[in-house]
Image (cartoon, rainbow, N blue to C red):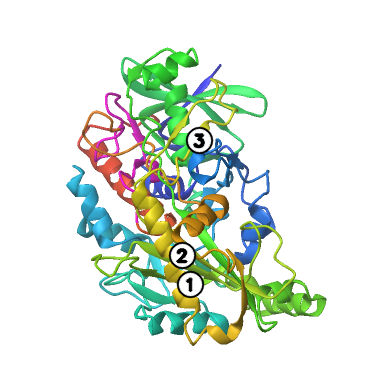
Amino acid sequence: MSASKFDYIIVGAGSAGCVLANRLSADGRYSVLVLEAGPRDRYPWIHVPIGYGKTMFHTGINWGYWTEADPGIAGRSMYWPRGKVLGGSSSINGLIYIRGQHEDFNDWVRLGNEGWSWQDVLPYFRRSERQQRGADDYHGDDGPLSVSDIPERNELCDAFIAAGQEIDIPRNDDFNGATQEGVGYFQLTVRNGRRCSAAVAFLRPAMERPNLHVETDALCERVLLQGGRAVGVRYRQGGRTLEARAGGEVIIASGAINSPQILELSGIGDPAVLGEHGIPVNHALPGVGGNLQDHLQARLILRCTRAITTNDDLHSFARRMRIGLRYLLRRRGPLAVGINQAGGFARSDPELHRPDIQFHFGTLSSDVPGSPVHRFPGFTVSTCQLRPTSSGSVHLRTNDPAQYPSIRPNYLATDEDCRVMVNGVKLARRLVAAASLRPYIAAEYSPGPDAQSDDALLEFVRRDATTIFHPAGTCRMGNDGVAVVDPRLRVHGIEGLRVADCSVMPKLISGNTNAAAIMIGEKAADMILADALRGHGSHNAAA
């Protein structure tokens, strides 16, 4: 096999990988290779905000993982969509732009990760952002990532927000500003009525550069190691096995599922796991694949008294045509805003000093997120616990890189998680019972009026709750014996190898994860370039 050589190799063109590709190639000094297991982002529904329903189960652009049967959710196996396309999950997600709470990042520092406090990461959030409202102390307006307001207010969303205020959840028009607590409209990563994925924002503008090379349909088999250093990668593409060499560093940016899988395939991980699959131990790192965390959502589904929901729009030929024409002619209407428009952050217990519950409010309903909507007028109030205390794992199922790993979320394994989820459902019920929403509710479809006791509500959560698509933590950042990367995202014990994606989060942030993944890519790029200038990273492979 002939091996091409680059300064930097990035494995994964998802939210962080696209940022890294842009920033590392920006000044033309370094050659950069990006490997993406999926195709280019040409599927039209990727770029339509409401296209989430079309991409959720699309096997051509979605890994379509299934977890192992999980006792915490009544023995169910859960579907976990993840983006397998340029842009990664930012090309198929719900477009909601949430950074997390300031305290989340300060907690990372308390866990031994210097340089990741709120004040440390805020400049990277601001640098990436093109905020529609303009720049201020919390926002930037000249970055690549468009963050925009929902252009049209919705009657049901307005009622939801008013109902929240009635039960003493304050109005909040900026969940990414001074404080997160409150109810309001989300901002979305949308530009002129089209999805602004990480590929659109960061990768596409950079692909004209001669020093950036992007290979799609390229499945990484393993990192190549030599003398305790990462020197390249082996990958499959078009029926061939190829190698690429890195004169500087290999950066794995493949997400919370694929990043630990690639490390284990490379002989980096728990010796017991590696030995089970006949993989020689290149470096014992027992924390690889552990610490898996995810947000679990329980969905209240309400039958609406009026035919004003997205369900009604989609089941009427005339309304579908009107919606389609509005989008084609003006880039406005339901197609331009995605699934969840409003939401909020609240405390399940008034004694708490910060929110531990997030609401997503959607003007539609279905039995499973992303599946066909109900025939009746319906809307959904989803509630999720922001900081779960249960954790699971991702480990190899076989030593074949094309086989999916074993995902064990271990949901609801602690009494605290069970209690917070039940309290979250009860709080959502208080909200929908408020005067502003009450006229719109004909009946509670799920969990239904029979579920009243805490035990009944916990049973509902176990049997009905689903992921809200935020896996994190499986290559945890830290300096203890089970950390995988250090605070500069360098894999412990291996030179020239980093991980930069949501897998490095020591604790899951309080909210949707895409903005934080982009921030991690921004900060990682700065650290990599700084180390190169100090002589600790890349030399010019093209020289």
Label 1 and label 2: CA atoms lie apart by 6 Å
The residue under label 3 is 407
Q: Nearer the viewer, residue 246 or 193?
A: 193
Q: Magenta residues, as a range?
A: 484-509
Q: Nearer the viewer, residue 126 or 258?
A: 258
Q: Residue at x 36, y 48 (%)?
A: 415
Secondary-structure class at tag 2: helix
Q: How many numbered dots are placed on residues in this image?
A: 3
Q: Residue at x 62, y 59 (%)?
A: 52
Vertical side of 43 occupied by 21: above or below: above
Q: Residue at x 47, y 56 (%)?
A: 455
Kindly identify the amino acid type of the residue bearing the numbered disc 2.
Val
Q: Which quarter of the rendered picture does the N terminus lie within?
A: top right
Find out whether the residues at labels 1 and 3 contact each other: C-beta distance under 8 Å: no
- Residue 125 has which mark? none
Toward which corner of the image does residue 423 lie, by quadrant?
bottom left
Q: Nearer the viewer, residue 516 or 244?
A: 516
The mark nearer the N terminus, 2 or 3, is 3
472 relative position to 341: left or right = left
Find out whether the residues at labels 1 and 2 contact each other: C-beta distance under 8 Å: yes
Label 2 and label 3: CA atoms lie apart by 26 Å
Secondary-structure class at tag 3: strand
- Residue 425 has which mark? 2
Find out whether the residues at labels 2 and 3 contact each other: C-beta distance under 8 Å: no
